[in-house]
Amino acid sequence: YWFNPKTYNLQIGDTVVVETIRGLELGKVVEGIKEVDDNKLEHDLKDVIRLANDRDLKNAVENEEKSKHAIGKIKEIIEINNLDMKTIDCEYTLDSSKLLIYYTAEGRVDFRELVRDLASEFRVRIELRQIGQREGAKMIGGLGSCGRELCCKTHLREFDLVTMKMAKDQGMALSAGKI
């Protein structure tokens, strides 16, 4: 993703604080400062908020730990509410003001009660994000039928449609769930 560096003299490898659609996050500078064509931008260019300081880095580590502990409690609360959904992952925003929960489900899920229960448990704003099976596989990782790490985990950024012909060419089982 591209961000406006404003007046910061950013170097490759610098850690910065940026605002994304998920909230405040840490980012790593991977390219030098340059002009980007408007047609390459997916959305309006947002500013780099600041260079990450020690407190930001400490918060990120603490949030990662909190997320690891939260996932079990989230699954427990989902089970109590008897909902047909699978929790894939969760993460806190850098300022710990929001907990994002990623899940997969076959159909629509009425999670009004769930959000209330989660908000009272974690005392932060809760955002549930339904993701597809392929996005879930990308987050979790694993091995493909070829025996190698999943392409979506290693190098694919976006998913193209998989056709029946592609599945047949690769010798895969021709079931919609597998495809």
Image (cartoon, grey):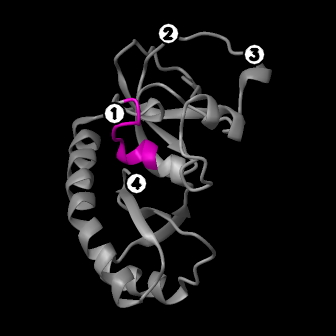
Task: Kindly identify the residue that appears in the image at 38 percent across and 81 percent down.
Answer: 78
Q: How many callouts does the rendering have? A: 4
Q: Find residue 84 and report its horizontal and vertical position in percent.
A: 48, 79
**Which residue lies under the disc numbered 1?**
52
**Which residue lies under the disc numbered 2?**
32
The amino acid type, in three-letter code, at marker 3 is Asp
Q: Quadrant of residue 90?
A: bottom left
The amino acid type, in three-letter code, at marker 4 is Thr
Task: Kindly identify the residue that appears in the image at 39 percent across and 12 percent down.
Answer: 12
Q: Quadrant of residue 4?
A: top right
Measured Cα–Cα span from mark 2 to mark 3? 15 Å
Measured Cα–Cα span from mark 3 to mark 1? 27 Å
Contact between marks 4 and 2 (CB within 8 A): the answer is: no
Q: For numbered disc 1, what is the local secondary structure?
A: loop
Measured Cα–Cα span from mark 2 to mark 1? 17 Å
Magenta residues, start to end: 137-146
68 shown above or below 114? above
79 shown above or below 90? below
Q: Earlier in the sequence, mark 3 or mark 4?
A: 3
Q: Earlier in the sequence, mark 2 or mark 1?
A: 2
Measured Cα–Cα span from mark 4 to mark 1? 14 Å
Q: For numbered disc 4, what is the local secondary structure?
A: loop
Q: For numbered disc 2, what is the local secondary structure?
A: loop
**Which residue lies under the disc numbered 4?**
93
Task: Kindly identify the residue that appears in the image at 56 percent across and 56 percent down.
Answer: 177
Residue 169 shows in the view: yes
